[in-house]
Image (cartoon, rainbow, N blue to C red):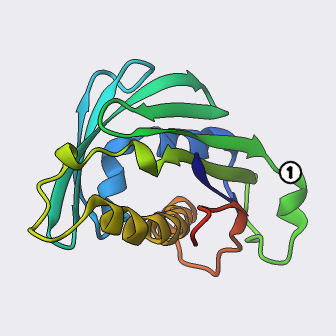
Amino acid sequence: MDSVELSTVVYVPPETAYEFLVDFEGYARYSEYLDRVERHGEGDAGTEYDIHLEWWKLNYVVRSAVTDTTPPERIEWRIVEDLHAHGAWVVESAPDATADEAAPADADGASRVRLVIEFDADSASSDMLDLPRLVSLDWVVEKVKPLVLSEAEKVVARIVADLEGERRDVDLTLHDSPDSV
C-alpha cells in the first residue's frame, strides 16, 4: 500500500477548517485534473461523490464515499470501486502556531490540517480505463504515482489560500510519499 501524507498550519480555528474541507464539491477549484464533483447525499457519513478526473488522454469518474466524520476533527473517506484507496482530512488545534512569525496579526486561531491518502496502485484493473492502444496500465500507474503527491501539495496550498483569504508561502510537511517518488 502506497501513501501520501501532508500537513500544514492554517491560521483559522479548527471548526472553520473543518467546514471548509467537508465541502467536497468545491475541490474542483484546486486541481487542474479535477473537472467536477457531484454529491449524492447530505455530506455526512454515507454520502457518495462522483469525482470527474481528466489527465493526459484519460477521463475517469472516481466514486468515493465519506465513511465517517468527527466534526471538527476528521473526515474519513474511501474509493468505492476500481481501486483500493482510502484516506482522511484530519484537523487539530494548533494554538502555539499563532505565535509563529508567519501568523497573521489578526489570526483568531490556528489548526494543523493533515491530508492522508493510502492507495494500492496494484489494485487498479486495466478494465477500469479505456487506454489508448499500446499503453499499458503499469505505465499509467507509474506516471500517476508522483502526480498524486504533487497534486496533493498543490491542493493543500490552494486550500490554505482560500481559508486565510490570501496567498502565502505554505510550509508543507511531507510525512509519507509513494515508494517510487
Tell me the element at label 1: helix
Front-lying residue, 91 or 53? 53
Quarter residue 181 falls in: bottom right
The residue at the point 40 percent across, 42 percent down is 123
Quarter residue 168 falls in: bottom right
- Residue 164: x, y in percent? 58, 64
* Outermost residue, top side: 46
Front-lying residue, 64 or 89? 64
Q: Please give left or right for residue 82 compared with residue 104 in the image.
A: left
Total label count?
1
User: Can residue 40 be seen at all in this image of the molecule?
Assistant: yes
- Residue 127: x, y in percent? 18, 44
- Residue 178: x, y in percent? 59, 61
Report the quarter where the N terminus lies.
Answer: top right
Q: Which residue is mark 1?
A: 95
Front-lying residue, 71 or 34? 34
The residue at the point 34 percent across, 50 percent down is 26
The residue at the point 35 percent across, 62 percent down is 138
Q: Please give left or right for residue 14 compared with residue 29 in the image.
A: right
Q: Please give left or right for residue 154 compared with residue 17 in the image.
A: left
Please tell me whether residue 54 is drawn above or below residue 71 in the rendered image.
below
Q: Residues within 10 Å of mark 1 (few under 14, many from 20)?
A: some
Residue type at mark 1? Answer: Pro
Q: Please give left or right for residue 24 compared with residue 38 in the image.
A: right
User: Can residue 10 be seen at all in this image of the molecule?
Assistant: no
Please tell me whether residue 161 is drawn above or below residue 15 in the rendered image.
below
- Residue 96: x, y in percent? 90, 56
The residue at the point 90 percent across, 66 percent down is 99
